[in-house]
């Protein structure tokens, strides 16, 4: 499996106030709209302009983008402002049209990233065009390997200026997000591919302009490399994603207040605390090993007595006891529930494998 080992950094034009920012309307709607927004963004110091031309809409009959007509609008905005231009591609013909027009950045949307056939078609169309920059959004389902697979297909086509964008996942859970973020996935992506810029799209995560800048700041606090933000000069009239687009004025106030943490603590203090953490982790592992040892002994007793491996009542008892303890220990209910379920799952697996040995 190829890594993403020889990536090039994104060009300086992506940077604004020390972080990468790609901003612009969800969709290009008219030449005038693209030009107006581009000029406002340029004044704020934004160097990369996004605008969707081909829009993947859930329902037919919605505004599906202006298509290739809008390429000239992006090119004109680039001439007027010097900004890099970005749009979404979902097929070979989109890629070819963008390359012909000189679009600088192509992004693969969440629905397309979920389909390896479509991503490979895009990768094939990119072959030999090493100057273009590609951003790959996460697939709509939380499947890290699928996301990595999409990145690798593009990388293998010779694209070295590559980035990932976390835009949240479709979820059936009752959540206030439009697409709930699962931060462990982009964090793991960054851990495995440190040179890969990982951006966050707070617009598609929140689906609500009132919350966009809060999630944007959280993303920066977690150490992600930048943001893709939907900005529209008249969001309430936008032809797509009207509720989540912020105005240039909202973006300006965010840029004035956002903080990019680049500081370092005095190494000594941090090291002392990290040593304590390492000791805690040693203790946790030793306790888990001991617990599983006892679990296996219990497994043998159950087997001899002809008892079932899973005792639902007992697990409920354990869970309730630890949950009520957790609140006084500054541990969240959700965390302790997940932890105890994971431990119980492993205990059941151990007892089952005990009973199939011999
Ligand atoms: C978009 O950026 O406008 C878009 C359609 O994004 P996603 O693929 O994340 O839904
Ligand atoms: Mn959108």
Image: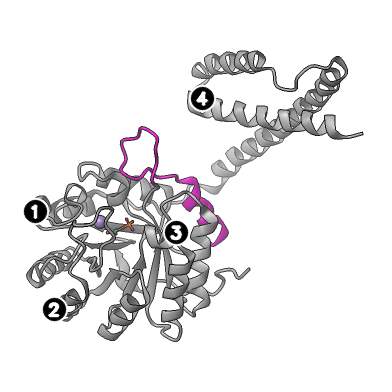
Q: Which residue is mark 2?
A: 80
- Numbered tag placed on residue 114 in the rendering: 3
Q: Residues within 10 Å of mark 4 (few under 14, many from 20)?
A: few
Question: Which x, y percent locates residue 132?
Answer: 37, 79
Q: Nearer the viewer, residue 279 or 226?
A: 226
Q: CA distance from mark 4 to mark 1?
A: 44 Å
User: Which mark is first along the chain, 3 or 1?
Assistant: 3
Which percent across, then down, holds residue 355? 84, 29
Number of other residues with Cα within 10 Å of mark 1, as a class: few under 14, some 14 to 19, many 20 or more: few
Magenta range:
170-193
- Whichever of callouts 2 and 1 sits on the residue coming sooner in the sequence is 2
Of residues 7 and 55, the one nearer the viewer is 55
Q: Which residue, given by chain and number where applicable, does mark 1 sit on?
A: 237
What residue did someone put label 4 on? 331
Queried on whether the Cβ of the residue with tag 4 lies below 8 angstroms from ligand 1, the answer reads no
Q: Which mark is residue 186?
A: none
Q: Is residue 101 left or right of residue 162?
A: left
| Image position of 279 with respect to 227: above or below | above
Q: Position of residue 327 (x, y in %)?
A: 49, 18
Which numbered disc, 3 or 4, marks the residue that appears first in the sequence? 3
Mark 2 to mark 1 CA distance (whole Å): 24 Å
């Amino acid at each position: 499996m190829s890594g993403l080992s020889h990536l090039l950094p994104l060009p300086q034009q992506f940077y604004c106030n020390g972080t990468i920012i790609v901003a612009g309307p969800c969709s290009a709607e008219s030449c005038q709209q693209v030009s107006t927004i581009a000029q406002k963004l340029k004044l704020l110091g934004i160097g990369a302009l996004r605008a969707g031309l081909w829009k993947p809409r859930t329902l037919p009959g919605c505004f599906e983008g202006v298509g290739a007509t809008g390429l000239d609008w992006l090119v004109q905005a680039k001439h007027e402002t010097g900004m890099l231009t970005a749009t979404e591609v979902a097929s070979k013909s989109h890629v070819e049209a963008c390359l012909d027009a000189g679009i600088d950045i192509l992004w693969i949307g969440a629905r397309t990233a979920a389909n390896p056939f479509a991503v490979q078609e895009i990768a094939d169309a990119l072959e030999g065009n090493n100057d273009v920059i590609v951003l790959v959004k996460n697939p709509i389902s939380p499947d890290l390997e699928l996301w990595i697979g999409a990145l690798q297909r593009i990388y293998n086509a010779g694209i070295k200026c590559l980035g990932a964008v976390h835009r949240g996942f479709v979820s059936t859970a009752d959540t206030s997000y439009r697409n709930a973020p699962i931060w462990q996935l982009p964090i793991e992506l960054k851990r495995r591919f440190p040179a890969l810029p990982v951006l966050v799209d707070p617009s598609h995560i929140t689906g609500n302009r009132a919350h966009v800048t809060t999630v944007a700041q959280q993303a920066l606090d977690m150490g992600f490399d930048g943001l893709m933000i939907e900005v529209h000069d008249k969001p309430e009239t936008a032809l797509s994603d009207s509720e989540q687009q912020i105005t240039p004025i909202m973006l300006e106030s965010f840029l004035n207040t956002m903080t990019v943490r680049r500081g370092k603590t005095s190494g000594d203090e941090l090291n002392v605390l990290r040593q304590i953490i390492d000791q805690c982790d040693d203790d946790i592992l030793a306790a888990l090993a001991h617990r599983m040892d006892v679990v296996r002994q219990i497994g043998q007793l159950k087997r001899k007595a002809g008892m079932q491996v899973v005792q639902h009542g007992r697990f409920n008892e354990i869970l309730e006891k630890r949950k009520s303890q957790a609140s006084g220990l500054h541990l969240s209910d959700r965390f302790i529930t997940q932890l105890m379920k994971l431990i119980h799952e492993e205990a059941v697996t151990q007892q089952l494998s005990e009973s199939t040995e011999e």
